[in-house]
């Protein structure tokens, strides 16, 4: 009687066949596998963009040349700041000139002919007369009277300018924190200066509506 444990399978054993593996490339004559390039595989290498690339300034050859370049750069920056200040550009203005309220004050003063413009000229003339002791006393009296008249006229003109500033600032900047007294002083100092030496330069013509 044949043993149950010695029974052999009626099915023949199937031999395992190796699965083909992907090769990185065809084999050469020597049997070694060849590595394909990205061009052979249809891939392209991304190129670095050159758009917007800034050309770097060549470094200075020595310390003297570096100092020269630094001075030239500082001179150009000062010139740019001076022109910006003269044209009233906000970022170049001094602290005393910054702010929309002070720009309005400058426009108010520059849009009118101020008596204070002639105040310094009158003062200089009176000083010249006072230094000359050989003149007729009536000339001294006339010079002093002219000085007094100009002083009173300048005070009246300054009062009128201050009143205009108060009205326009309250209308256009109701939430302003600028003190009116400082704006008045700023306006008077500008009003007694000659127009061609005012800084920032006038941005409105005489007679313009502000």
Image: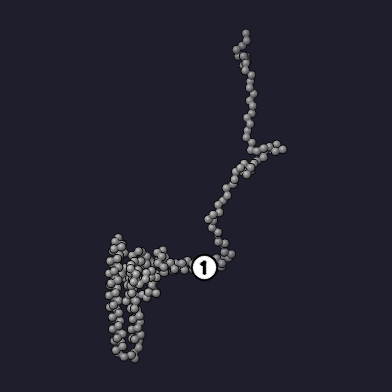
- Left or right, 29 with respect to 47, comes to right
Colour scheme of this structure image?
one colour
Instruction: List the single residue furthest toward the top.
Output: 1
Q: Is residue 168 above or below residue 20?
A: below
Residue 17 image-quadrant placement: top right
Q: Is residue 143 above or below residue 207?
A: below
Q: Is residue 143 above or below residue 168?
A: below
Tell me what residue is drawn at x 29 percent, y 89 percent.
138
Of helix, strand and loop, which one carries label 1? helix
Instruction: List the single residue furthest toward the right.
Output: 29
Tell me what residue is drawn at x 30 percent, y 69 percent.
184
Q: Is residue 135 above or below residue 80?
A: below
The residue nearer to you, when weighing 105 against 112, is 112
Can the viewer see residue 138? yes
The residue nearer to you, when weighing 7 against 48, is 48
Tell me what residue is drawn at x 61 percent, y 42 percent.
42
The residue nearer to you, when weighing 168 against 2, is 168
Residue 21 screen position, x and y as percent: 63, 33
User: In the rendered view of the protein, which quadrant contains the N terminus?
Assistant: top right
Q: How many marks?
A: 1
Can the viewer see residue 181? no
Residue 89 screen position, x and y as percent: 41, 65
Residue 73 screen position, x and y as percent: 50, 66
Q: Residues within 10 Å of mark 1 (few under 14, many from 20)?
A: few
Residue 91 image-quadrant placement: bottom left
Tell me what residue is drawn at x 35 percent, y 85 percent.
128
Residue 209 image-quadrant placement: bottom left
Q: Which residue is mark 1?
A: 72
Residue 197 screen position, x and y as percent: 39, 74
């Amino acid at each position: 009687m044949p043993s149950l444990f010695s029974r052999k399978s009626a099915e023949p054993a199937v031999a395992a066949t190796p699965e083909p593996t992907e090769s990185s490339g065809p084999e050469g004559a020597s049997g070694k596998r060849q590595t394909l390039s990205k061009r052979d595989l249809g891939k392209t290498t991304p190129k670095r963009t050159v758009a917007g690339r800034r050309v770097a300034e060549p470094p200075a050859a020595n310390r003297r040349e570096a100092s020269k370049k630094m001075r030239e750069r500082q001179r150009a920056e000062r010139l740019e700041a001076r022109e910006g200040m003269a044209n009233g550009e906000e970022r170049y203005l001094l602290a005393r000139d910054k702010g929309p309220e002070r720009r309005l004050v400058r426009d108010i003063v520059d849009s009118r002919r101020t008596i204070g413009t002639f105040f310094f000229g009158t003062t200089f003339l009176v000083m010249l007369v006072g230094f000359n002791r050989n003149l007729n006393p009536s000339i001294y009296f006339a010079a002093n009277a002219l000085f007094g008249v100009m002083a009173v006229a300048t005070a009246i003109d300054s009062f009128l300018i201050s009143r205009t500033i108060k009205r326009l600032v309250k209308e256009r900047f109701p939430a302003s924190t600028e003190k009116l007294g400082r704006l008045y002083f700023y306006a008077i100092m500008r009003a007694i200066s000659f127009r061609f030496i005012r800084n920032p330069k006038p941005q409105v013509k005489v007679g313009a509506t502000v």
